[in-house]
Amino acid sequence: MIKIDDSSRECVLSCEVFPPKKEDSFPKIYETVDRIAALKPAFISVTYGAGGSNSGKQLEIVDYIQNKTDTEALAHITSVGYDRERLDEGLRRFAEKGVHNVLALRGDRPKDMSDEQYASREFEHADDMIRYMRSSGRSEESLMIAGACYPEKHPEAPDKPTDIFFLKKKQDAGCNMLISQLFFENSVFYRFLEYTEKNDITIPIHAGIMPITDSKQLGRTITLSGTSVPKKLADICANYGDNPEDMKKAGIEYAVNQAVDLAANGVQGIHVYAMNKPELCEAVFNAVR
Ligand code: FAD
């Protein structure tokens, strides 16, 4: 199980991978995982498509991480796509493989899901799912539960106080740690940490960092996450967008600088959204260490 140690002054490094959509690129994910595991991260998290299309593959990948490498696996679960029965079954399967870490999320509505189906999900929000897991006998000793947080607020939240009010509910429901949405401006994250502290959120908060390696990726990322883009990063995309090699180099450098500054300012953890590109983790981890 992932150790939650508030007293440690070391910045905990971790990474996210996702099950590839194309069947033929699937074997490559194990090479990716091996390369990331060689960097000795505290954990590798594996995403879950709320539509459920890659659920079997997610189980295979977390099994591989947990049992074929020295790394802890963290399985994402979403309340969109998981009812009580499916959640119990999913947690049983994870436990069978020795996986005792989950990131509990609401999830976003898949394009092919009807309004009715979406509205009728059993767990409306991530905290409902966390509360259920704790109330059905999953103690902190047997299951580590992480949750998501949003330094710039969740796009659906009317304002920051409301978002923080509900974030506190995750902690109260039994969430052990938080992983943040990606952000490109560290001052945003530092203000967020101050705000969470003022609102009695005391569990560790790990910073989400995504190296931008091509200019189209930036557009997709903003659309999905609603994250704001500082001028410096926008300029990098404008200047190097047509030159893939230089763009990748400059994007990695931007993320490395962000990560080094975060570690120097004592953040508890950095979680790299590496887009299944191990070289991005290598660059960030090596620079921080
Ligand atoms: P919630 O915590 O439920 O919050 C959603 C909104 O509802 C917020 O505006 C919040 O303020 C509000 N809210 C929260 N609780 C309550 C409540 N009790 N009552 C009323 N309002 C409430 N998506 C995937 O599909 N698969 C993944 O693998 C995945 N991985 C992710 C990993 C990380 C680290 C992050 C940050 C996001 C990830 N996402 C993933 C995206 C995530 O599912 C979306 O951001 C989703 O819109 C919100 O999920 P949540 O768990 O934060 O939701």
Image (cartoon, rainbow, N blue to C red):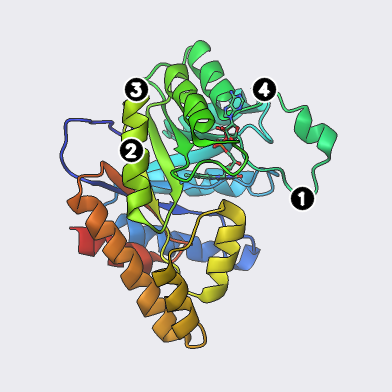
> Looking at the picture, which amino acid does disc 4 mark?
Glu
Q: Is residue 268 left or right of residue 55?
A: left
Q: Which part of the image, by quadrant, shows the N terminus?
A: top left
In the figure, residue 245 lies in which quadrant?
bottom left
CA distance for labels 4 and 3: 33 Å
Q: CA distance from mark 3 to mark 1?
A: 36 Å
State which tag comes first along the sequence, 4 or 2.
Answer: 4
| 92 lies left or right of 285 | right
Q: For the residue carrying disc 3, how many other residues have a C-alpha within 10 Å: few (<14), some (14-19), or many (20+)?
A: few
Query: Which of the two labelled residues, at mark 1 and mark 2, occupies the earlier sequence position?
Result: 1
Badge 2 density bin: few <14, some 14–19, many ≥20, Cα 10 Å: some
Nearest to the observer: residue 11 or residue 88 = 11
Q: Is residue 153 above or below residue 236?
A: above
Residue assigned mark 4: 85
Q: Which residue is mark 1?
A: 111
Along the viewing direction, whichever of 102 and 57 lies nearer the viewer: 102
